[in-house]
Amino acid sequence: MRKRPSARLLLRAGLLALFVASACPGTAQGSRELAWADSVLEQLAGHKQDDARRAAELARKASPWLERGPDACKVLHIRALLANYLDRLGAVDSAAALFLDDRFARIGTCPANVQKDYFRFLTNVQLSLGEFVRVDSVCVLAYGLAKAGPLKGLDLSELRCNHGIAMASMGRMDAAMGLFRSAYEDARSHASTENMTQALANIATIHALSGDRDAARRTYEEVRDLLRVSGFSDRLVRCYQNLGSIHKDLGNLETAIAYQDSAIALARSSGFLEGEAAATQGLAQILRDRTPKNEAYDQLDRYLLLHDSILSSDRIKAVAEMREKYETERKERENVALRAENLEAALRQEQLRRTRNIYLSVGIIVLLGAIALWSRLRFVHRSRAAIRKEKDISEGLLHNILPEEVAAELKQKGYADVKEFEVATILFSDFKGFTTLSEKLTAAELVAEIDHCFKGFDGIMERHGIEKIKTIGDAYMAAGGLPEPRHGHPADVVRAALDMQDFMSDYKAQRVAEGRLYFEMRLGLHTGPVIAGIVGVKKFAYDIWGDTVNTASRMESSGAPGRVNISQATYERVRDEPGLRFIPRGEVEAKGKGRMEMWFVERAA
């Protein structure tokens, strides 16, 4: 009989990995912990866990170490696994919250097994929340990736079963049946007996719900034969129970009794108490249907109901008697305590009269000292609060004008080194006809319009992890890939640029509806090496230099209003990104650069 790996085996493997890492000479503590976290992830992803609580605890402990590692896909994988365990434990809201992480937008760049687990566990949570339409959308997306993408050739039978359950829950039984049959074929082609039995059990359920009990019986018999070979004892108990119920509905009471007896015996031998209880109840119902005039059974049933009522009545009486006894004893104790207090009060009164004057004098001295100390502490507290407030303001201003890493370096050393970045993607935007439009607006209106647009751009940059560099008049400049190279991939900068044009398009529609003037924007991107840092000692700002910056500016000036224009270098790095479509422009004359290959980029339909 095949046994699934237990949580104890998983824990032992995790501890062994930690021990081995600790025994290696010259290995840093962080490296050992990261190796342990990698081992835990491998075990959790490679085996189904019976103990969801223990697995969730290990996933929580491993997650912070994977966050510090270089592989973002491992972070997404451990979060998806943790969501699955929380869902199994009933914490569905917590599980759903884990999938709200913005980093899951990059799941398409991860290995196929990570993407498969993501879709499978996400649909599990959506089923628990009753979001059946969303399950349908997610599954359709996954099937597209399976036809010509990273999921091609993988066993998606579990995902198809989730899709079928969603369809059945929405009353679309024919669609559900088709999905369960596809799941069975998928599992069979991958020799996954466990998934084959799950798909067949779902098919049998659809037959039963549709009233075709003969088809349900035949399908459950197939499930029974598979389970007998594979050795899933708990599932076999449930299968016997279902066969017993179906034979009972078909009128085959003797066969139904035999199946329920088998379920009881198997559950008892494997220690499956819940299954034994359910099978015993099913057997009792069948026996009663076979001899419906069994008066002894009816009287026993009535006795159990009356006995429960008597027990409840006795408990109520016992509680009432105990409460009454407690109240009587409490009142007696209060009376005795009251008499003792009266005697003690007379003695205390005399003692208080004699010592009152002494305590009064001492109290006045202590009070004066306390007032003086309180005044001093209040002064110190106010001074510290004022200093802390000023410090917070100054640090806030510093972080607002400099990247966090550069600000930290500046505070630590008093200066920040200029750094070279081999790959950075520079974004330039400029409003078309700004000079003409500025002549038709007051200065206050012009500044308000620019402020509204730049605030929207700032939010887009923050969402995509891109560093805003500066604004010059109506021009906006930002960069991806610095000051941390792992932030701001060229694809992120492209998507941010598309969001900026969407923002301007929506704002244009609003302004046209109001009968007011509006801006249109050109936007260009180029990828290449740059130098970045701060120079000078007064009014310093984080800036970037290099030919890449000049080329990005030419991409903007050579573009078109409402479009995103990118260079050949940027195109080479993002051309395989999903969801993007590229329109070749050929060689376009760029001021000071000559003819350059350029591309318009837009979202794929």
Image: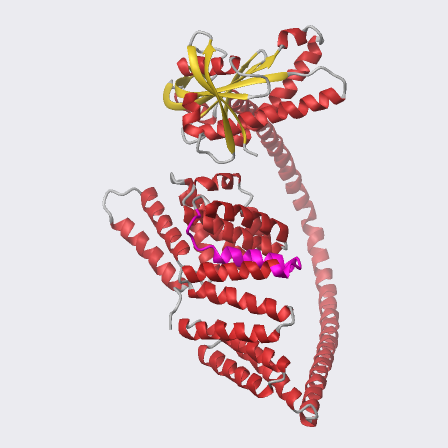
Magenta segment main secondary structure:
helix
Tell me where residue 515 sits by quadrant.
top right
Q: Is residue 12 magenta?
A: no
Q: Position of residue 62 (x, y in %)?
A: 41, 49
Q: Is residue 604 above or below residue 311?
A: above
Instruction: Left or right? Give the position of 83 relative to 594.
Output: right
Q: Nearer the viewer, residue 203 or 344?
A: 203
Please name the residue shown 43% across and 12% down the image. Answer: 595
* Percent x, y of residue 496: 54, 27
Q: Which residue is nearer to you in this view: 281 or 31? A: 281
Is 215 left, or right, of 570 in this rendering?
A: right
Q: Quadrant of the C terminus?
A: top right
Left or right: 64 with respect to 274? left
Query: What residue range appears in magenta?
Result: 151-174
Question: As drawn, which residue projects farthest toward the left?
Answer: 25
Nearer-the-camera pick, 588 or 267: 588
What's the residue at 51%, 19% (across, down)? 524
**Residue 345 relative to residue 3: left or right:** right
Q: Can see residue 445?
A: yes
